[in-house]
Image (tube, rainbow, N blue to C red):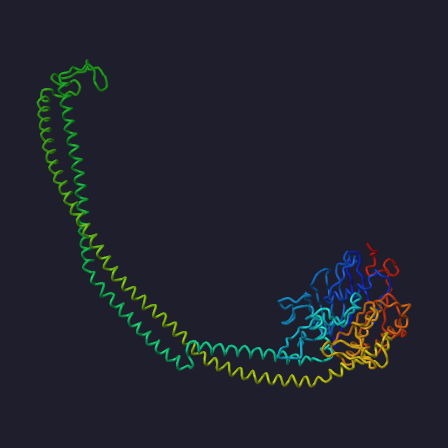
Amino acid sequence: MMNIHFNFLFLQCKRSKEKIDLTSQISFFYGQISSGKSSIAKLIDYCLGGEVEKTPAINKELISATLDLVIGDYQVILERTYETNKIQCTWMNDLGEQATVLAPVIPEDKAIWSDNIFSLSDLLFYLLGKSPIKIASNQNIDEAALNRLSFRNFMWYCYLDQQHLDSSFFRLEDTMRKRNSRAIQKYILKFSSEKLTELEEEYIKTKEERSAKTVTVSELKQFLKKVGYDSISEIEKDIKNTHTELEKNKVEKKKMEGGYLMETHSSDQTRAEIQNLTRKIDEITEALSDLQRTLEDQVSLRAELITSKFKLARTETVVNILSGVDFENCPSCGSSLKDKFTEPDHCKLCNSDLKNNEVNTSENAEIIRLDLDSRIKDIDDSILNHKKSVSRQQKQLTTLTERKSFFEIRLAEELKNYESIFLSNIRNIDRNVATLQERIKGYQKLKEFPSEIKKLEENIDLLILKEAGLRRDIEEERANLKLADQLIKDLENTFLETLKTIGLPGIKDEDAVIINRVTWEPMIIDKEDEQGNWNFHNAGSLGKKTLFNVCFMLSIHIVASRHKLELPNFMIIDTPMKNIDKEVNEIIFKRFFDYLYIIAEGELDNTQIIIIDNVFIAPNNKNLSFYSRFMTPDNDQNPPLISYYRGS
């Protein structure tokens, strides 16, 4: 049994914090419309991952809702801020172990707790001491997929909300919900056990693994056949031949590399000639540079000698012009020479002996002129000789340079022709070597295929044996599920008894109830007239459909409590007398609530019941754990859910 007990519901509003007492076994909320009665049930469901109706009061005033409850062995607090999809879950057990986590309503990719808890639903199952529940979608396990059920699926059998109370209880209007609704009934009534689910899950995984490996073996065999191999020996033969060819190519490469040095010696004479020419060119270039420097020096000296000759001529002219001139004033400083004492036959300016100076000056000038002419002639001859030498050296340098260029071009052609052939051959061999090496690697991988195929086939044989064993275990477990038939029959009888006790119109003492094992819909069987058979869909009035659904939920909880089946032990029924007029159907009202209070003391003594209705009927037994609250939309003595709110 899934033990869940509500303690309190807290609503944090903008101007108050409301506390709703849920500690009693039966909590009865009744009163006038628009007082927030239905919102209590919806907010409990909201804290358990459901949705809440956005009434004006809720939409304007609610900030968060908190549900204080017991789940399994844990004290739990569920806190949900309004209009969010995550719930803060905090729990603690008697040993003081505690934790808190933010749980999403919709599962996320990353686990929020442990390794397999991804949502609030998974966490609730965890607190109940259960793993997430999976059930095969049909009885043909060869084709069945496993459905992961949510805690929300169980809520269909624990919470009947007013809006959908007179519509399909079995969720037939939605394919996915219909399948999950059936799966829940099968799980509750042990038509599918956890052990059976595990066996079916293991069987499906084993079958999928075997199928995948069988396909792999088939593909490997087809591939080997396509490339022309049937055995390892054939592959090893090709590996040996390829190795032989590879060694031949390696030897050929070494021979070519050795021959390269020998072949390139044919160009050594050309290289030597280029080196000899280079040395001569360097020598001539250096000599030519020396000649040009000497020639420049001699041209410069000749210019200086010619300049000296002009200076000598000008000096002699000046002497002839100024000779015998009687200076009264010094031509340099302008001082008067009249008062200056000068010896006879001496110059008034420099005091030189004029007698000796006349002869020496004229003779010296002639001697110097002759010497300058002689030296200029010698330098001219030397310059001419040097120019001839420079010309010869330049011609020789040009010849050597052209010859060197010829040999360099010749050497480049020789090396180019040889290296082009050599490199081409080397590249071809390298390509062959690389191809052969890759081919050997490929053969090595192919060599593993037959042994891998053998391993896979051995594994497939083991999986076939495992499948057979699992199928046998599944059949044995199904044989052990005879209890399921007894539980279903008990539910059929209990449902019929509930309908009779309440006095649902159209039920006769001789009628029977049959639950279809395929659709899982209960059918009322008229033993006297087959045309009188009916179910929820053709029950008639909405009030009758409402009672049909309410009685079925009561019945399945009675059977679950009686046999300790896996169903949350609480019921929330919002307006069980919906569409039923109390004045006209007073007997049905009284019978329903009397029956509810009786089973609450009896077989549902461990089941918490929350009732919401417009009319209140008190229990006869004053010792029953019972709480009631009358609610109005505008009376301070009996305030609405949000005590200060008085409508918009």
Q: Quadrant of residue 465?
A: bottom right
Residue positioned 48% across, 82% down in the render: 454
How many numbered marks have been drawn onto this rendered protein structure?
0
Q: Give residue 332's position: percent from left, percent from top.
A: 22, 20
Q: Position of residue 603 (x, y in %)?
A: 82, 79
Q: Is residue 389 above or below residue 258?
A: above
Quarter holding the N terminus?
A: bottom right
Front residue (pair 115, 185): 185
Residue 366 versus residue 182 in the image, above or below: above
Where 71 falls versus 265 (above or below)? below
**Towards the viewer: 347 or 555:** 555
Picture quadrant of residue 66: bottom right
Position of the C terminus by quadrant: bottom right
In the image, taking residue 117 as reference, residue 277 lies left or right, namely left
Which residue is drawn at the image coordinates 83% and 69% (left, top)? Answer: 541
Which quadrant of the figure has residue 331?
Answer: top left
Residue in the image at 11% along x and 26% along y: 365
Is residue 209 left or right of 225 when viewed as pictured? Answer: right
Residue 239 in the image: state x and y as whole percent.
Answer: 37, 77
Left or right: 225 in relation to 61: left
Q: Nearer the viewer, residue 278 or 461?
A: 461
Give the percent coordinates (x, y) of residue 467.
Answer: 59, 83
Left or right of 303? Residue 236 is right
